[in-house]
Amino acid sequence: MVPHVGFDTDQIKDKARKDLLYLLEGVRGKKNLVLERGLAGPINLFVKFSTLQEYGVDKLFFLENGNADVSQRNVVFIARGESARHAQSIAADNIKRMQRESQTGHEFSIFWVPRKTLVSEKILEEAGVLGDTTTSEFPLYFLPLEKDLLSLELEDSFADLYLRRDPTPTFLLARALMLIQQKHGLFPRISGKGDNAKRVAGLLARMRQELIAGEDTNETSKLGLTPSTTIESLIVIDREVDYATPLLTQLTYEGLVDEVVGIQNNQADVDSSIVGTVPQPAPGSSKTVGAAPVETKKQRITLDSSDKLYDQLRDTNFAIIKSLLNKVARRLQNDFDSRHSTKTTAELREFVNKLPGYQAEQRSLKIHIALAEEIFKHTRTDQFSRLLEVQQNLAAGADPSSQHEAIEELISRDAPLTEVLRVLCLESCISGGIKHAHLEHFKKIILQAYGYQHLLTLAALEKLQLLLSRSSPMAAMIPMSGAGTVAGAKTNYTYLRKALRLIVDEVNEHDPNDIAYVYSGYAPLSVRLVQSILQKQYLTSITRGGNANNAAGVPTGGASQGWRGFEEAVKHARGATFDEVQKGEDRAVKARALLTGSGEKKIVFVVFLGGITFTEIAALRFIAKQEEARKRIIICTTSIISGNRMMDAAIEKGSLGKAIAQPVE
Amino acid sequence: MANPTADWEKVGDKFYRKIQLYTAVFDQDLELENYIVTGCSYGGAIALHRDETKLHSFRGSQASKSSIDLYSCAGKLIRRINWDKGSIKGLGWSDDEKLLVVTADGTVRCYYDLQGDFTQFSLGHGAEEYGVTACRFYGTGFVALLSNNHLISVSRYDEPRPKLLATPTEGEVHSWTLIPPAYTLSRSVEVLLSIGQTIYVVDASESEDRMLDIGPFTHISVSPNGKFVALYTETGKAYVITSDFQNRLSEYDSKSRITPKDVQWCGNDAVVIAWEDEVHVIGPKNAAAKYFYDGRVHLIADHDGVRLITNDVCDFIQKVPDVTDEVFRFGTESPASILLDAVEQLENQSPKADDNIQLIRPNLVEAVDTCVKAAGLEFSIHWQKQLLKAASFGKSVLDIYNSDEFVDMCETLRVLNAVRFYEIGLPLSYEQFLRLTPEKLIRRLINRREYLLALRISSYLRLPTDRIYVHWASQKVRVGSEDEDTICRLIVEKLAGKRGISFEEIARAAYDEGRGRLATELLNHEPRAGKQVPLLLNMEEDEIALDKAIESGDSDLIFFVLLHLKKKLPLASFFRVINSRPVATSLIEATAQADDTELLKDLYYQDDRRTDGANVFVREALKQPDSKTASDKLTLAAKLLADSKETSFELKSLQEATTLLKMQEAFDRDLTETFTGLSVNETIFKLIKLGYASRAKKMQSEFKVPERTAWWLRLRALVSKRDWNELEEWSKLRKSPIGWEPFFTLILSAGNPKLASIFIPKAAPTLQPGETIAMYEKCGMRVKAAEEAVKIKDVETVDRLRNLAGVGTVEGREIERLGAGLKRP
């Protein structure tokens, strides 16, 4: 039997690389690669373009451009199988075109990510090209963005889930989790909040049944279906439960970089005028898969834990970035100056050996100072401080109508629509809708200020239940305590603000004692919910009047008791609540325990369905740090999200009477 | 009992043995020489088909019917498949005992269960025009040779994708063969063609001449491990070379002018050449053994030897395995052979038994191991027993011995003997059994409908039994004569609680048999939606299929059903089906938005979702190239909302949008600037900026732009126009509803501190005391700032300002003077 290995995100990375290279190897000779644009970033995370070249890749094209040429006999497509659009594009815009254009025959291969679908095959068949292609599966589900962070990197998952009500992301997430279960054993306990989260749990149960019913019933797969001894539990949080958190402006460094510059697949495109003086990083990685078509004005920088400085900075509150950067700069200077004090040649050699390290550090310091400067420019503006003030007042429960004047002013001053909508949605989420008359007024001035095409935007926001009138039936609050047995239809922030202590006034940004530091005083509800499972004692102590400072040191987790102690509070958040225990045969459980041994730190998987923000990640890492001695926390999500991305899902891009400038779909 | 070495023949320094597997194989009337005979590997079934190129005696109409007959190795007829599909150009087997039949026109039939059920596909790539001349098969696929020398490769049968290989040169192909993809460097199949004097190697991308000059070859054969190639020339010489054509290993002269019927490998060490009734086994260095038979001999190569089929016998020739050689070789004194002898002595109750044991005491473990292994390689039950007894005896003397292998071997031998039994007729060697794996052996038994034996073996070897039950049940629903309820109950009773049962397969069998109701009932017991749905669609149980798909949560499945239904049903009934299912509706909405707005309109119309319907038109309006058509679309949208109260806001907005477009059109015309595409605010802004104040005013009132917004717009527009006079005039006229601070800020950042400073006193009442200081400072007016500081008695600031200005300067002195009145702390 294969020796059991613990869970490690690197395994996933390795596997993805091996899978892809194996598939490429199967296509003999040189080949052109045609990639779905959305996959370029993720693939770049685990394989470099130079490696692909070693495996015979000659040129790279994007599927959406439809410009793949016929220079190679072999053409390999990589696209997501779930989307019928891609299949159509492959068939019509590419394969058929190439067959027309070129006299010689071509070998077409399609690698469907993460699985072949009936629909895509059907479309190929109907287009009459299925016979000319070889299709295979490239089972790329979770992508490790960091050692503790797995993402499906489904860009549109937020819109899919809540706007279009398309269950695909839910299904893919369940599939991905199922793969973890098959390898490491069942999650002994599954708890969660939200209707879609419940659906994931349901799917997991179903997939387990299907697996048992499947043909493959040998001993090993049976072992995979007993509760794991290395995993403690799975916690699923539906984004729907807490819309307010991502709508607030993120105040950690990484969060702000995302808000201001935007981070995609661990990479940010920064204007080269900002970091322009920075020399190219190592030449090997410069020509990365996605880098090819970026205009020269933008420079792509990688933001992950391989950059040691960034690793230190990313999760800290932006307020202290300046002093941190300062400190690092000074230390670097000192280290570097130490060369003057070297006396012996041995010392000198030691210094020279360290030189590359210094240079790398210096380079990254330069980048981050430039980035921080850029963000400062943004945060110093009048508009930014206005916005932040409005946001924080709303979060703290101030009377929303007192903020209206400020919001109106933002609109009159032509502030970015995203920002305006963010505050309005925030108000709607936190105070259970906006008064009908006020909402109509805002809608009117938004349409006048930004154009009537945003009738569609407003309709989408309503469908997302982000922007509702108080009189709308969807905005109805759950009955206040007492009759509260019905699952919440809407998250009641007024109640939860107290019950879970969402507002912490005295936050210390330098040495944080509570997750509230990530929003400078507001603790994300979503993460509080996770805490109510993992850090019961701590949460109890701060919600029952105790001071956060006293309890911070002793956050013992009553290991796995689900929602116990917080049932009442959880009822006031939107959607279904569940807590299930997965059992296996006793004999098998024992066998598994024997095989793996116990006493190891157990893993808790925290899953955010519908997306997670960098601030929430920072907050979860903060908890992980406190719980370090007892467990590991692995964060899983469908994609990284921010308020801007939520708004983008709704905002209509076209405008009336100007269609010529818009590409017709 | 005959000595096992009786059938050994020496070839070079190695022994080969011929084992008689079965006798009286075929009916004596069967003219085997007139048949094409191909056998499946691992002792599998044999297919016979009358060779159409040969004459045969007329035996009445019955016998003349063309057929493919499947026999076991023992000559038991498994199935007769009637054939009326034209001339067969390829007949072969896959590793999992699928029979492949390729006709001249390129049609391929794959008979997947020995019972006549088949799937069919065609080769394409010109096979129909040129015709298939021959085929060569390997474990999972085959290659067909067309009359124009084109080669078509099929590498799998579950999803066959015939592919054209590189085109070899013209010329007569004397003989050909292939190297399976598992053994090539390129991972694709390679074909060896004897054309002219040389051999061409063809794969997916190129055809390469190997530059030989000893051809043409009448036979080419590749060894089971793909490393060696045997070539037989017209002159009766046989060569063995490596498959990369680098080394010639041996050469043999058969001294025969007659072209042999067949050349095959016997394992990887020897080549077997068969003439009509004579067989040569050729080893390295020209060594050979010869066998003679009464009738025509057919060769069936297997992984570790070769089977010879004649009317009378089925023989197996293989190299004597090393352990067997060690035990039985004449005159050997190996420990194992002494141990074997000891058992015989023991049976004779001779004390020599103990002497023997003492003799080999130091090597006893090795001797036991050898006996166990040799037992496995033995076909004769007598010698199996004898060897196991010896091992058992040796074991009993040893203090410690791990008996696992002994036990396993006993189990394996029981299984092997059971399937070798002539009524089953699977003459597996031990090595073949290991390669085949027990699971696949079970599958072969299932295909032969030996359910009981399959079940017994499965439970004996602790293997899953689901497939056996499913197959049995499928048979049951096909041929069972009971009524449907009884059958369903019978099957469910028997299969309930067993793991891994695929009810879908059984249901499919029932459906194929025309028992629809039974199929539906059975399908209810299937937990896997992915399996249920396609069958349900076949059965036209559309709504159940949709429900099952939705239950599964797999959007692909749902969407697949929806596509199917959309195509099949009239629109009204399609909507009826999806309306009650929100997931289905939202999936249709999402895709229709991209490519089928008409469908969307209909959907919203019949569902009375007016706002959504109107939005479709709005979206269309956005795609219109000019205002005119866009307005038309907006009017259509408005019409939908006309008589509902709830949508009055949307209605009004749409009307406004139309008005805006109209006005912008007029502006575009009159002012030779583009306004279309801008929002109301942007339009007003642009108008003011361009100096059309009255038009802007008109717009403001037309759209009831709030006063505050209007002020902001005007302010921003004037600032960006740098119209300082206008700003100043304007500010004198009225009181600002947005305060004066924005005036200050915007004008200052536009670079006019002088004008900006005018607004400081205006704004002052709404500001915190002291803020004005900074404001003046920003305008560069330190004196004014100092004045303000004096007002609030801020000495420090005054001093700071003075220092900034420089003590000696005019400004400095002025500040000094202002500050003089303040009390110093």
Image (cartoon, coloured by chain):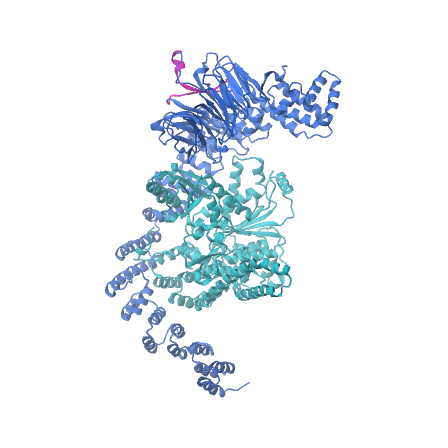
Chain colours: A cyan, B blue
* B613, A170: nearer the viewer: A170
B480 drawn magenta:
no
* B516, B762: nearer the viewer: B762
Residue A202 appears in the rendering: no
Q: How many marks are shown on the rendered structure?
A: 0
In magenta, the rendered stretch is B58-85
As displayed, is residue A634 above or below residue B760? Answer: above
> Relative to residue B514, is residue B659 drawn left or right?
left
Tell me where residue B554 appears, x and y as whole percent: 45, 43
Tell me where residue B46 appears, x and y as whole percent: 48, 21
As displayed, is residue B25 above or below residue B706? Answer: above
Q: In which quarter of the image is the N terminus of chain B?
A: top right
> Relative to residue B751, is residue B502 drawn left or right?
right
Tell me where residue A471 appears, x and y as whole percent: 41, 59
* B105, A251: nearer the viewer: B105
B62 drawn magenta:
yes
As displayed, is residue B456 above or below residue A416? Answer: above
Residue B231 appears in the rendering: yes
Tell me where residue A510 appears, x and y as whole percent: 57, 65
* Residue at the left extreme of this rendering: B670
Q: Quadrant of the C terminus of chain B?
A: bottom right
* Residue at the front extreme of this rendering: B213
